[in-house]
Image: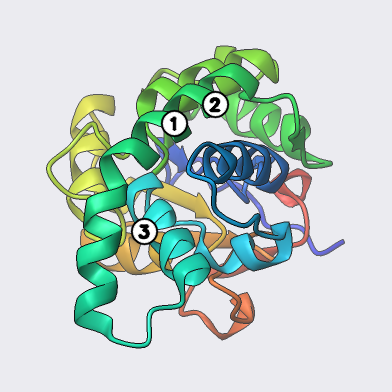
Amino acid sequence: MNFIPIDQKKLDAAIVDLDGTMVDTIGDFAEALNRMLRDLQLPSIDAARIEPMVGKGSENLLRSVLKHILRPVDEAQGAIKIDALYPAAWESYQRHYLAINGQYSAVYPGVVEGLQALRAAGLRLACLTNKPTDFAVPLLQAKGLGGFFDKVFGGDAFERKKPDPLPLLKTCEALGTAPARTLMVGDSSNDAQAARAAGCPVVLVTYGYNHGQPVRGVDADGFLDALAALR
């Protein structure tokens, strides 16, 4: 394993993504989405199809799934049909996700060790995810990770989501740290683009969800095969 040292002279805090970085949640997504699709009397979707859709928030995920299932030939007519289905789909998805949150997911190896290393270095920690806050907080608690974080912000906490830099800037503000001294730890181009625009250093894990693209092709300051590589 290639280790990345935590430079206490340059860092005061770290912002850590959730889905694909700390917890493998594809199983949760698949279960909640397929329960929702059954409610709408629509065909099911495989977990492998869902993975490239993850990362831009639950609203985008839901619309991407509906578009995939409906496979509209006419984009305009497809959008109208998706808009008509969306309110019922969103209500069903939220209900099912809250019911199963964490039951079909697992913490990645090395995550606890990595968070412990960041804490031992004296860094303040925040979890920043595009997942809704009401999904993120219970998941962190269920997986025994909640106690590591001073702040937790979901995709509904601010006016815009990653890859916009606003959530990172607001999180730095909440932590009382400068962006240049706040490390972003994520798994995708969303995290890297937001960090670059906000002025935060960024490292990416190699095992997460990067919209179906190789993560090592993303502009980042380093790559981790496990969070435990932070030392």
Three-letter code, disc 2: His
The residue depicted at 60 percent of the width and 60 percent of the height is 50
Tell me how the rendering is colored. rainbow
Tell me, yes or no, whether the two marked residues, 2 and 1, touch with CB atoms within 8 Å: yes
- 2 or 7, which is in the foreground? 2
Q: Residue 156: image x %, image y %?
A: 25, 35
Toward the left, the furthest residue is 159
Three-letter code, disc 3: Arg
Q: CA distance from mark 1 to mark 3?
A: 13 Å
The residue depicted at 48 percent of the width and 30 percent of the height is 123
Q: Secondary structure at mark 1?
A: helix
Q: CA distance from mark 2 to mark 1?
A: 6 Å
Toward the front, the furthest residue is 41
- 96 or 4, which is in the foreground? 96
Q: Secondary structure at mark 3?
A: helix
Give the labeled residue for mark 1. Answer: 92
Up-down relation of residue 231 to residue 133 (above or below)? below
Q: Residue 34: image x %, image y %?
A: 62, 44
Q: Earlier in the sequence, mark 2 or mark 3?
A: 3
Give the labeled residue for mark 2. Answer: 96
Label 3 crowd bin: few (<14), some (14–19), many (20+), radius 10 Å: some
Q: Residue 145: image x %, image y %?
A: 64, 20
The residue depicted at 40 percent of the width and 21 percent of the height is 134
- Quadrant for the N terminus, please: bottom right
- Quadrant for the C terminus, please: top right
Three-letter code, disc 1: Ser
Give the labeled residue for mark 3. Answer: 63
